[in-house]
Amino acid sequence: MLLFCSPLTLAFRRLTLRSWKGVDRDHSYRMLRQVWRRLWYSWRPYTGSVPPSLVADLKNVEIPTQNEKSLHTPVMVKEVLQCLDIQPGQVVLDLTFGAGGHSKAILQSVPGVTVVAADRDPLAFQLAQHLAQEYPGQVKPVLGRFSELDKLLPSLDVDVALLDAGCSSMQMDLSERGFSLSKDGPLDMRMDGDRYPDMPCAADVVNALDQQALASVLAAYGEERHTRKIAAAIAQARSVYPISRTLQLASIVAGAFPASALYARRDRLQRPSHVATKTFQALRIFVNDELNELHAGLRVVQSMLRPKGRLCVLTFHSLEDRLTKRFLRGEDLAAPPRRSIRQRARALREAEVEEHDEEEEGEEEEKGRESAHWVIPQKKVMKPSEEEVQKNPRARSAKLRTAIRR
């Protein structure tokens, strides 16, 4: 026990001595408690290194039946069906099958359609195979990323395409996947599961990147304002023990803030939001290369969709939505995004707000700008109704954009 505690004790004494310098006597006790809390939070969830055997084996995951609780509640199903305007006998490409909520709604509402169900998640692929047994000859499961679909589906022409970006509730609710900061599990976050064993997971990122690079990831993909503070807390904690669990990382990020700020942030329903939410979002996007994959998926749809074919894209945060909007408008994605005067003024005015909500850019679409490949039937972006948000709070940030292939 003495050998086990000695490194912890030495680290605590070093941190205490460094933190004591330059602190007024009146605040010394509070500083001492803060330093101890940071060290304790970074150590407490640690249970040792996570062997590969503990990583989720998706092949052994039991797939719920229809009588069990749904793995995922699809977002804006009525709006999607209305915008896609699917006709009997058409070929539908569902690029993010997930738990199959949208595909099931399409199969149930339109007779004789063929759904190409693609997803990078092996568990989603299994669900697509089960759906193919329910609808023989109408569902074609495909396992692969957006960037792999041009090779997996050569010379495929589709009439309608649906792209539901982001992370599914099925992935968030499984603690073994490591996406959720409210459930303890290995810090994984790989949407591909164990398909690519050499692919870095979130634990590799937080333990390997230097402090400056880690801060850049949080700023670029999480739109986090306190990147330096969080990156410094992570670097300090991993010097004591490796970061390998979701709750461990959430505790480290929380320790970088005073207790009053832990749930001071609010989501769009004005509910308390954990301070580590954007950190987890940034790591997930970085690990899975989500923005580049989204761009690849949009290019795949552009090449496969027949003239007059319809595309619907569901996004759940501003990075995805901005990329989709600029792509459909034919802008050069390598160039800096254009912002209206109103958007720039809003960004300055809301610098203290934790979410950069540019979410009225849909209402501010520039008239007269047309793409060589797409026609935008409606200038305003569609959002879920208040009734749906109350029933499914995870739909609160959803945005639906529709485009027609020229």
Image (spheres, rainbow, N blue to C red):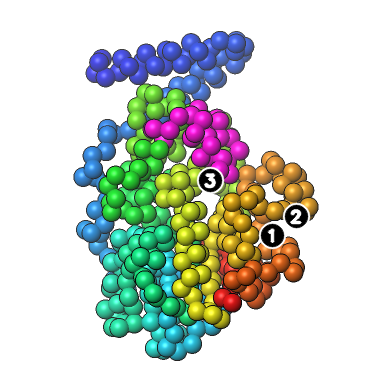
Dot placed on the residue nearer the N-terminal end, 2 or 3: 3
What amino acid is found at the position of numbered circle 3 in the picture? Answer: Tyr
Q: Secondary structure at mark 1?
A: helix
Could you tell which of marks 1 and 2 lies nearer the N-terminus?
A: 2
The residue singled out by tag 3 in the image is 221
Please provide the residue range marked out in magenta. 206-232
First in sequence, mark 3 or 1: give its number.
3
Q: CA distance from mark 2 to mark 3?
A: 22 Å
Residue drawn where x is 51% and y is 70% of the image: 302
The residue lying at 31 percent from left, 53 percent from top is 193
In the rendered view, would you say 317 is above or below 154? above
Relative image position of residue 144 (x, y in whole percent)? 35, 62
Q: Is residue 214 magenta?
A: yes
Above or below — where is 83 with respect to 316?
Answer: below
Q: Nearer the viewer, mark 1 or mark 2?
A: 2
Q: Is label 3 in a helix, a strand or a loop? A: helix
Which circle marks residue 340 in the picture? Answer: 2
Q: Residues within 10 Å of mark 3 (few under 14, many from 20)?
A: many
How packed mark 1 is, by other alpha carbons closer than 10 Å (few <14, some 14-19, many 20 or more), is some
* Residue at x 72% of width, y 53% of height: 339
Structural distance between the alpha carbons of marks 1 and 2: 9 Å
Which labelled disc corresponds to residue 361? 1
